[in-house]
Image: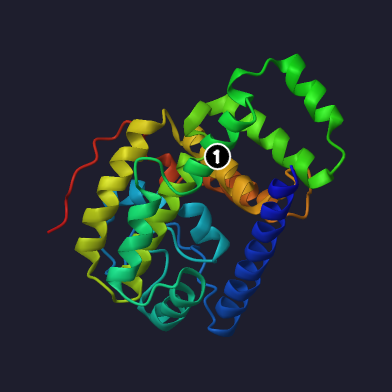
Amino acid sequence: MNKMSKMNKVKQFFNLSIMLAFTACFLLTGCGKSNKSGETTDAAGENTSETTRFINGTYAVMTMQNEGDYNLVGGQDSSMKESIKQMLQQWWSISDLNSGMKQVNELTSENGMHSKEFVSEVKELGIDKMSKEEFETKLAAITNPEQKIHFQLLYDAYSDLGYKAVTGWDLGRANFLLTSFYVADFTDENTALDKALEVTKRIQKTFKSWDEYNRSYMYGYLYWSNEDPKDSSSKYTQRQGFISELKKDSKSPFQVKWDTKLEKDWK
């Protein structure tokens, strides 16, 4: 378990660094453009299709985190081009479309990025064959708080969604990247949507509802960040709050029916 503890500390440091830097970036560039109009329009002021809204919904939590507009592809307008380019370079080592697609391809690979690690841990620790009683016995024997949180997460996530428990996190981040490439002017909007549509169809096929997808997304976030879900001051709690807001918002992408036929309706 020492190896796991070390890994989690690294993830915590990386997560905190990203959040601080990205928050600073957005504050310095005046990116607080939260959606207040309630209108479902794109950057050109035209009606946004149900398919585009669905795509936007797959990374809407991140859009809310960044005080963006869920009506816009990528969550931001062209004024954020340089800030998005800086974010992609600093935290993803993405400087152009080619390096960006390497990250997307890893996230969307058959085994995924974090999904692969999650499944490996679940199997290695025997969680996929563990009874509730066995789990509680092993959990009680763990004294390290971080390891305890991590072990609980693995069990809860697998018990809820099986091996696909954190797939939503990988796929949602892939769509965030693809649409950010458009905002950064690495590609045009239609091309970004074409690629995001492929990922979104996979998301729709993998999960049964927005609720199930969001649970997977948040399990993945916890797996990546190693935050304590019981910590009311955590980014996890904040993101859960965004999900609640989006579920109540009559104009949000989460109001698009999950079984909506997703089809290319742009040029």
Going 79% across and 26% down the picture, which residue do you hit? Answer: 138
Q: Residue at label 1? A: 118
Name the residue located 46 percent from the left edge and 68 percent from the top edge. 92
* Residue in the image at 65% along x and 53% along y: 225
Q: Amino acid at mark 1?
A: Phe
Q: Residue 194 versus residue 69: which sits nearer the camera? A: 194
- Residue at 41% in and 69% down: 76
Q: Residue 106: image x %, image y %?
A: 37, 53
- Whether 205 is drawn above or below 249: the answer is above
Specify whether 262 is left or right of 103: left
Asked if residue 36 is positioned above or below residue 84 in the image, the reply reads: above
* Nearest the eye: 187 or 73: 187
Q: Is residue 266 left or right of residue 40?
A: left
Is residue 9 placed above or below 111 in the rendered structure? below
**Where in the figure is residue 33, as x and y percent of width and height?**
50, 71
Q: Answer with the quarter of the image where residue 235 lies.
A: bottom right
Corner quadrant of residue 128: top right
x and y percentages locating residue 209 in the rendered image = 43, 31
> In the image shown, does 223 or 71 lie closer to the viewer?
223
